[in-house]
Amino acid sequence: MQSAMSRILLVEDNGELAAAVRYNLEIEGFDVTVAADGRDGIAQARAIDVDLLILDLMLPGAIDGFDVLESLRADGFSAPVLILSAKGEEGDKVRGFRLGADQYLTKPFGLLELLERVRRLTTRGAVPRRYGQAHETMRFGDVVVDLDARSVSRGGRRVRVTPRAFDLLVALLRREGKVASRIELLREVWGFERSVMTRTVDAHVAELRRKLEEDPANPASILTIWGIGYRLDRNGANPI
C-alpha cells in the first residue's frame, strides 16, 4: 500500500479494462480518476493534481493519446506519463517518448508489471527531508537544479522539464564532466526496461537542450560524445 495516497489519472476508452485497472490500483492504495476520451483526459489533467497519467493512445474522437500528451506537455504538465497501448510499433514508442512519455507498456500486459511500473513512477525522487533543512542544489551556468523539490530554474525563472528529463540531467551532473554512455543512462534513469530504446535518451537530451541551452543547435553544456553518449560541461555554460 502507498504510505501517502498518489492520484492517478487513467485515460482509457475500454470500460472493462479501465474498471479492472482502476480496481487493482485502488487496492494498492491509489486514488484513481478515469477519463474515457482525449478531451476529458486533458480537462481532468488540468483540473486535478495528478501524480501519474496512464494514457491509452487509440482514443475515440478527434483527440488521440498523442494529442493529449503533446497538449499537456506544452502546457507545462510535469507528472510522469505511462503510455498503455496496443500500438507496439517502434515508431509509435519513439513518438511517445519524444512527446514526453516516461514509460511505454503494450497491450496485452501483465497486471504485476503494470503495478510495478506505477510504483516506480509514483515513488521516483521521493526523498524525506526534515523541516527547515536546506535543499540540495546543483548548478551549471545560470541553471539551478533543486534535487529535493525536483525543480529546475534558469536565470532565476522556473523551467518545466519532464520527470525523466530531470533524472537524466541529475545523472549527467553527478558525473562531474565524465562521459556517460547511452546504455549507462538507460540503466540508471530508466532501469533499462525492455520498452526503452537508446533513442529515448536522445529525445530527452533534446528536451533539455531546448529548455536550458542558449543555442540548442550548438549546445555549450550538454555535449554529444559521438559514438559513446553524453557529458555535461559545467564550464561551457555562460556564467551566472
Image (spheres, rainbow, N blue to C red):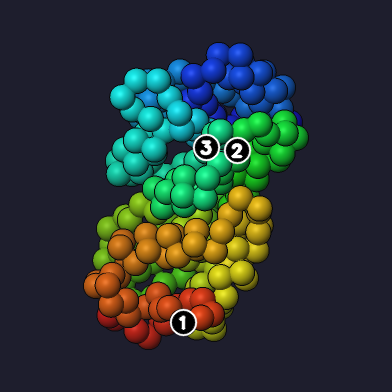
Q: Are marks 3 and 2 in contact (CB under 8 Å)?
A: yes
| Left or right: 58 in relation to 76 | right
Given residues 209 and 46, the one toward you in this image is 209
Per the model, the C-alpha gap separating discs 3 and 2 is 7 Å
Q: Considering only order in the chain, which callout, 3 or 1, is on the residue closer to the N terminus?
A: 3
Residue topped by disc 2? 106
Per the model, the C-alpha gap separating discs 1 and 3 is 31 Å
Q: Amino acid at mark 3?
A: Lys
- Quadrant position of residue 74: top left
Q: Amino acid at mark 1?
A: Trp
> What residue appears at the point 44 percent right and 60 percent down from the top-left corner?
204
Residue 67 spot, x, y in % from top left: 34, 35
- Quadrant position of residue 206: bottom left
Q: Are marks 1 and 2 in contact (CB under 8 Å)?
A: no
In the rendered image, the vertical position of residue 192 relative to residue 232, given as above or below: above
Q: Residues within 10 Å of mark 2 (few under 14, many from 20)?
A: some
Q: Amino acid at mark 2?
A: Thr
The answer to whether residue 164 is seen in the rendering is yes
Task: Tell me the tag on residue 226.
Answer: 1
Residue topped by disc 3? 87
> What residue appears at the point 58 percent right and 24 percent down from the top-left corner?
31
Secondary element type, mark 2: strand
| Left or right: 184 in relation to 199 | right
Q: Quadrant of the C terminus?
A: bottom left
Per the model, the C-alpha gap separating discs 1 and 2 is 31 Å
Given residues 161 and 186, the one toward you in this image is 186
